Image: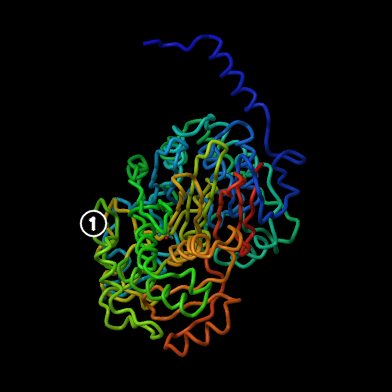
Amino acid sequence: MKLFKPLSICLLLALNILSHAQVSLVGAGKKVDPFHYEVVKNGQFRKASVSSAHPLASLVGAAIMEQGGNAFDAGIATQLALAVVYPGAGNIGGGGFMLARKSNGELIGLDYREAAPSKASRDMYLDKNGTVLSALSQFGDLASGIPGTIAGLFATLPYAKLPFKILIQPAIDLAENGFVISEKQVNDFNEQKDIFIKNNNHPIAFVKEGKWHLGDTLFQKELANTLKRIQKDGVKGFYEGETANMIVAEMQKGNGIISLEDLKNYTAKLRKPLEFDYRGHHIISFSPPSSGGIIINQMLKMIEKYPVGTYGFQTSKTVQLMIEVERRAYADRAEHMGDPDFWKVPVKTLTSDKYLTERMKDFVAEKAGSSTDVKAGTIHESEETTHISILDDLGNMVSITTTLNGGYGCKTMVGGAGFLLNNEMDDFSVKPGVPNMYGAIGGEANAIEPGKRMLSSMTPTLILKNKKPYVVIGTPGGTTIPTSVFQGIVNIIDFNMSASDAINKPKFHHQWLPDIVMIEKGFDANTKKHLQTMGYKLSDRGSIGRTEAIRILSDGKRETAADIRGDDSVAGF
Ligand code: GLY
């Protein structure tokens, strides 16, 4: 075996890396200009596509691919950039899932979901009378699971081409030298000011004297220093040493329980992706501890027997059928799904034809079903999460959903380290078998146990057509995530919509309990009326999800679309 590459190859490699290192991507007038950028909702690209929740993060991903990186490089760099420019959900203090299909057909499911600390216990959010103390699972240090994101990025690195040092540099630049915040962020920071002050006993970058205004620049020096430690020391720069000490010091101040051992022992895990066919397309999605893949598998297979395309888009016939399959899939979520390392999730049965045919036996067209007699329940989840869809010139497909859970997680920043912690512990069933403050019921499968990963709804998904890459899709939205992905897929496959239409059409959501259909603004008024006459209770609500999708057209162009519901933006070439 040769131990050394020939000198010429080594030299070329070194020069290549050096040239990447020398070109700074971020700065006024550079490829990624933090002071002049715009939201771009659609693009048709030939070689590289990124769609994410923030224009600067998408630009970083595309620039990294222009520098010679692949979709995995872009995935790492975009996530790190989002942790800086989209701190409500982008993160290094949270967790996520990466689903990918390499150009050679290999599938990768990477689980870097947060885990319960070793001192966590089943009743940790109950008072002595057994009453749920939801403030503790939602705010402050005790709400935080052990963060997984940095472990996930380093577990992605073997599939990437560029050195980590280069991939993290744009995030460092954005944190250190600042970027102009968008109008949405101005409003967000102003609205959250009191809650930030309440949950932090040290100054944090998002709180300033007076109010934020349009045109203001956000600087995050402490975060830049944390990112530099990760750049220098790798995964240990987060899970050991100074950053880990800061996390544990924060826990001691704020009544949290994450220990140095918890951090040191955290690892990302490979999960076998879930695969199934739908109307001649091959769908690949995430398996437990996400419920998302199973739910979309169940819903798509339950509607496959019906000619939805001929029923028409959002006619009452189509919508009623989709509501009823949503009801059934979400009922199964609560009863049967949890971390597969702690609970046997009957994936095969739940997705089998026999079981799903049985589930639809009591479906009656033109008549609302009822959730009252069903004995399982759902779990409350917050909706602030974020998704990135990426495709490179080789055809590597990368779909990443990542989260702090609630907007700005537990609202507490690690003192001196400049990043927010998650409040993912609230995704466990805080009190199995008993309705929580939202009237929802959690299952035994998702009870708190040390080291266990809380059930998620995140549904990063890929679609192949004729065995070739076709669609990359995913969204934030808590329990609404699987329904958004479900409806996006149906819009593309059954209604032949463009990526942009498929994600931007108004949506509806039913999650079994509460037994209501949530409806987004702009939904067809006649369909709403007809559903009410069938016996459905409808409830108008704000946005459902912020989906990012890429669809490959027959001429090879990649239709790249960002959701119109936020600052979401595409970039590519
Ligand atoms: N925290 C949102 C989810 O994991 O589904």
Please, is residue 162 above or below residue 265 in the view? above
Ligand 1 position by quadrant: bottom left
Q: Position of residue 91 (x, y in %)?
A: 51, 50
Tell me what residue is drawn at x 41 percent, y 11 percent: 3
Q: Considering depth in this image, is 313 or 447 the residue closer to the camera?
A: 313
Please, is residue 506 above or below residue 273 in the view? below
Q: Is residue 334 visible?
A: yes
Determine whether the residue tagged by mark 1 lies in a helix, strand or loop: loop
- Most extreme residue toward the bottom is 533
Horizontal side of 41 relative to 293 (left or right) equals right
The C terminus sits in image quarter:
top right
The N terminus sits in image quarter:
top left
Q: Is residue 255 visible?
A: no
Q: Position of residue 443 (x, y in %)?
A: 27, 67
Tell me what residue is drawn at x 39 percent, y 42 percent: 107
Horizontal side of 232 relative to 289 (left or right) equals right
* Image colouring: rainbow
Task: Check disc 1: other Cα within 10 Å, few if <14, some if 14-19, many if 20+.
Answer: some
Tell me what residue is drawn at x 60 percent, y 22 percent: 16
Horizontal side of 246 relative to 442 (left or right) equals right
Q: Position of residue 559 (x, y in %)?
A: 61, 51
Q: To which quarter of the image does residue 536 belong?
A: bottom left
User: Label 1 is placed on what type of residue?
Assistant: Trp
Q: Position of residue 570 (x, y in %)?
A: 64, 51
Residue indicated by mark 1? 343
